[in-house]
Image (cartoon, coloured by chain):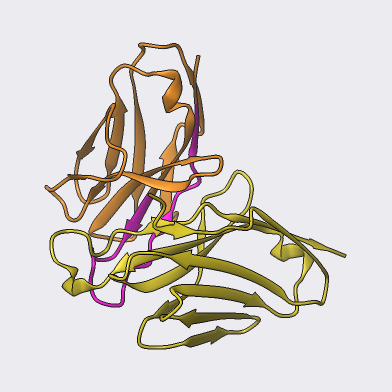
Chain colours: A yellow, B orange
Amino acid sequence: DQQVKQNSPSLSVQEGRISILNCDYTNSMFDYFLWYKKYPAEGPTFLISISSIKDKNEDGRFTVFLNKSAKHLSLHIVPSQPGDSAVYFCAASPNINAGGTSYGKLTFGQGTILTVHP
Amino acid sequence: NAGVTQTPKFQVLKTGQSMTLQCAQDMNHNSMYWYRQDPGMGLRLIYYSASEGTTDKGEVPNGYNVSRLNKREFSLRLESAAPSQTSVYFCASSPHFGTSGNYEQYFGPGTRLTVT
């Protein structure tokens, strides 16, 4: 059962336009969400995160929105640049009060390949 | 400061062979993780070590063993490799396992393993 889903395998946008990457989750115990960026032949690198107590977090060109009622988050990149072309993974972690040893473990989505055309 | 390093970068094994993937971090992190990445599956947790001296199974532990050698090093062993273990393996570390609001993990460059 895929608890974190990125339903769009790929996204293609023009340089300067907005890129919107989407992620849905099913586990209501998730309360911390992260986005990672991955270039070919490299490991994933942390991009931005959001706690469930917020609905928006912004860092430069990157903004993550969280809709808890819909169990949906999105990553907006404005303006998109060719160097943003990469695979983007969303990840989620249960809250520290979830019990057991589940907290601190990240569950990843399948990834979305973003291509930004010059 | 190299961050998380992994060796080897590439490996080809025959079915039934064994090997150990090495991982080290120099960030003084307490927690370390092993993931595998397969097409269309994202990253799946194999094993993790919340702190030195402890290891626990993740989502897909079958066919693997781990050793947390010391605070810096966390190795992944395939005792009898199978074609289903063909994948890209990533090691990661984090400062503290599950510390509230501090879930960020730092990844190594990966090991591409092919089992024929």
- Quadrant of the image for the N terminus of chain B? bottom left
Residue at 77% from the left image edge and 70% from the top image edge: A81
Task: Please say whether residue B30 is one of the residues in the magenta stretch.
Answer: no
In the displayed structure, A95 sits above or below A117; it is: below
User: Over which residues does the magenta segment extend?
Assistant: B92-113
- Figure disc tally: 0
The picture places residue A30, in percent across and down from the top left corner, at 32, 70
The picture places residue B114, in percent across and down from the top left corner, at 51, 23
The picture places residue B16, in percent across and down from the top left corner, at 35, 11
Indicate left or right for A100 with A4 as reference.
left
In the displayed structure, A104 sits above or below B41; it is: below
Indicate left or right for A30 with B8 as reference.
left
Q: Residue furthest front?
A: A70
- Near-viewer residue (A13 or B81): A13
Which is the main secondary structure of the residues drawn in magenta? loop
- Near-viewer residue (A7 or B107): A7
> For residue A17, what is the image quadrant?
bottom right
Residue at 50% from the left image edge and 85% from the top image edge: A57
In the displayed structure, A20 sits above or below A113; it is: below
Task: Please say whether residue B101 is one of the residues in the magenta stretch.
Answer: yes
- Near-viewer residue (B111 or B60): B60
